[in-house]
Image (cartoon, rainbow, N blue to C red):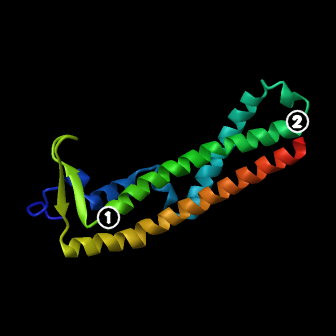
Amino acid sequence: MKESKCPVPKEQQPLNEFIELSKSTTFSWPKSKKSLTLVLLKFWTASFLIFLIISTGSVFFKTSIFKYILLSLLSSLSIPFLISIRLYIGWKHVFKRLNSEKVEYEESGWYDGQVWQKPLNLKEKESLIASNEVKPILKNIIQISSIILILALTGILFLQSNSL
């Protein structure tokens, strides 16, 4: 966006928000499915150890070591799932701003919001970035989140069927 024509502050311009998010350590994980999977597996492993320690206090699971470990595995899935939700929310926000015909911005604070209509060439450029760069990232996050949910639901159903 050209400074002279665009009244939107530089840090609130959708293209600059995309660049900042791409440079961010955390939000760059989903750029490839492999890196996101590895990071979430590391978080799952670390949280499994923490949940395993927390679960040792349960009197109910001291009788069944299998249920104790399975419950810790299932509980620890919540951490990678929450991380993937946070990544999705951030990238979805940028996707919507890049695809939007108008840019909402604040000049000095929350109380003076303005709306700026994007010129056609800028809208086309940002839509192209949204569809070629951001959409695959959102797809990766959704796929991995779905796998996490399927694992959790399968484990919960397995626990329920064994407790009857």
Q: Residue 147 in the image: state x and y as whole percent.
A: 66, 59
Pick the residue in front: 112 or 50: 112
Instruction: Return the disc, 1 or 2, that comes first in the chain's sequence.
Output: 2
Q: In this view, does 115 lie above or below 108?
A: below
Quadrant in the picture for the N terminus:
bottom left
Tags 1 and 2 touching, CB below 8 Å: no
Q: Residue at x 88, y 35 (%)?
A: 65
Q: At label 1, which amino acid type do we have?
A: Leu
Q: How far apart are labels 1 and 2 at the CA level?
A: 50 Å
Name the residue nearer the viewer: 97 or 87.
Answer: 97
Which residue position is annotated with label 2?
A: 65
Q: Is residue 76 left or right of residue 139?
A: right
Q: Residue at x 28, y 58 (%)?
A: 16
Three-letter code, disc 2: Ile
Residue 90: x %, y % from top left: 42, 52
Quadrant placement of the C terminus: top right
